Image (cartoon, grey):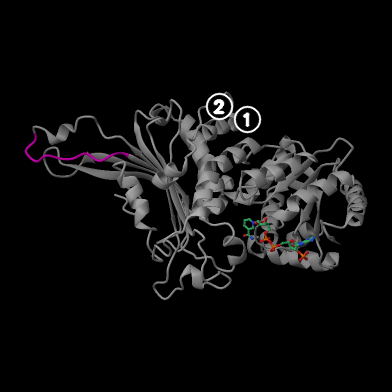
Amino acid sequence: MATETPTRALFMLFGGTGDLALRKLYPAIFNLYKKGSLSKHFALVGLSRKELTDDEFRAKIIDSIASETDDKAQAEEFASHFYWKSHDVNNLGHYAELRTIADELDKKYELEGNRVFYVSMAPQFFGIVAKNLKDQHVLSENGGFNRLVIEKPFGRDYESAKKLNDELTSAFNENQIYRIDHYLGKETTQAIPVIRFGNPIIESVWNQNFIKNVQVTLAESLGVEDRAGYYDTAGALRDMIQNHALQIVSYLAMDEPNTFVDTEIRKEKVKALESMEIYDAEGVKQNFVRGQYGAGDGSPAYRDEPGVPKDSNNDTYAAGKIVFNNPRWGKTPFYVRSGKKLAAKQGRIDIEFKKPLVDIFAKGTKQPQELQSNVLSLLIDPKVGIVLNINTKNSEQGFHTETVDLDYVQSPERAAEVPLPYERLFHDILNGDGTYFASWPEVAAAWKFVDPIQHLWDATQPDFPNYKPGSMGPKAADDLLARDGNSWYYPNVR
Ligand SMILES: NC(=O)c1ccc[n+]([C@@H]2O[C@H](COP(=O)([O-])OP(=O)(O)OC[C@H]3O[C@@H](n4cnc5c(N)ncnc54)[C@H](OP(=O)(O)O)[C@@H]3O)[C@@H](O)[C@H]2O)c1
């Protein structure tokens, strides 16, 4: 994964002592450093209101990368590139100090003016940081790159997302903005274009003529944990479907790009997302289902979780059907679902192919056999792999059919080599590659699809709670597929 020439860059990390930074971002940067994608020419300034010395900050960094290395000298050398600055994002005077530090570190580490500004803070700060960086001249002006990285969530509806985007683009160009969606850093998501377009036996049948339905499942076994403050204002539709699920859908549904570069891939993703049918109120009722977990197996109902209002109507589960108005997918439904406190943590894509038009082994044989649909499963999480379920003959004489899995599941050895999602994403940011980041037109199309669903849900009283912890969600989500003559492939995998 190392670039041939390590990238030179200064990172400014807003929210430098936050949970995400300590758990995910520093280990990811360390792994890039270990593999040679960063060399001696990098520095990171950690920022938040806390007063820390550089040494105190470096001790936190060494702690945060402890699980990635046993090499104390290497960890200390890495941490020596880290600097702390107490900074309130609303204080304009603090940005002048940032400019001075940035210029000093640029000289000291010969960074050629390259700057990455990572805003790992609550979303209300995204816009103000971008504006102040520009207005207070913290952006590099000597030919290096300026890149802005924004965490999720990107808005809570189309209007707020557009307002945020307008704020960001008044300071940075679209091609300088990297909107993080960590599902796009996962191995399987990144493999979708190769699995599809690199295999004629797959791409030639990747359309409505051969595929009966596509299912994207992003199931979590955990409940809301200690995130009630945020989660109760978001819900499964906003927190998982609008971003992660629809991004995965866009790679599954897009047409082949002219070339596999970010600008061309994004064009195709946008085309796919913009061809999703937008539902009116009746369409929402028919095609989307929400849920909230009750109590069970010794665990509290969502409404009894710490920090959740007793009368909360927040969705901890969302499932729905997406219909594309385009020639490739017209008659093939894409189903998406995500929820908390479900039977298992499971991220996967199941593609069910159509059965043969004539069930030839059911005719003229002594014991009629029913053929099953072929199913291609792309496993995202916790297992990473590809499974193709096909019909074959069992060991009896005659045409007795059975299904078997042709499967590739990543070995622990291979898994240990695979970069962490944030490591891949940092690597791409340093290389200026936006392939696995959501562009604004994609985000806008996703919100335009989700808004009518959320509006109807906000305006109507749900019958919550409606699913048990440890189940796969409300019954209505099974009925949704049954109406089309389909059923969820997982967890009843053959
Ligand atoms: N944590 C996760 O697993 C996770 C997962 C996906 C996405 N995200 C996203 O990542 C972002 C960060 O999440 P997080 O969990 O790391 O949040 P967090 O733990 O609450 O950290 C927030 C950071 O912002 C700083 N901060 C707050 N107000 C500030 C101000 N006025 N000026 C300067 N700094 C200020 C805080 O430090 P001080 O109090 O010292 O100022 C702290 O370092 C959010 O957008 C979140 O949605 C997080």
- Asked whether, in this view, residue 87 is left or right of residue 229, the answer is right
Whole-percent x, y for residue 489 in the image? 34, 48
The CA distance from mark 2 to mark 1 is: 8 Å
**Residue at the extreme bottom:** 298
Q: Magenta residues?
A: 365-374
Query: Splitting the image into four quadrants, where does ligand 1 fall?
Result: bottom right
User: Is 71 contained in the magenta span?
Assistant: no
The three-letter code of the residue at mark 1 reads Val
- Asked whether, in this view, residue 303 is left or right of residue 134, the answer is left
Q: Is residue 169 above or below residue 421?
A: above
- Label 1 CB less than 8 angstroms from ligand 1: no
Rendered image quadrant of residue 287: top left
Q: Residues within 10 Å of mark 2 (few under 14, many from 20)?
A: some
Query: Which residue position holds label 2?
Result: 257
Residue at (48, 37) in percent of width and height: 252
- Which secondary structure, mark 2? loop
- Which secondary structure, mark 1? loop
For residue 373, which numbered disc appears in the image? none
Rendered image quadrant of residue 77: bottom right
Please name whichever residue, 226 or 295, is drawn nearer the observer in this view of the structure. 295
Whole-percent x, y for residue 118 in the image? 74, 50
Are discs 2 and 1 less than 8 Å apart at CB?
A: yes
User: Is 372 contained in the magenta span?
Assistant: yes
Query: Which residue position holds label 1?
Result: 261
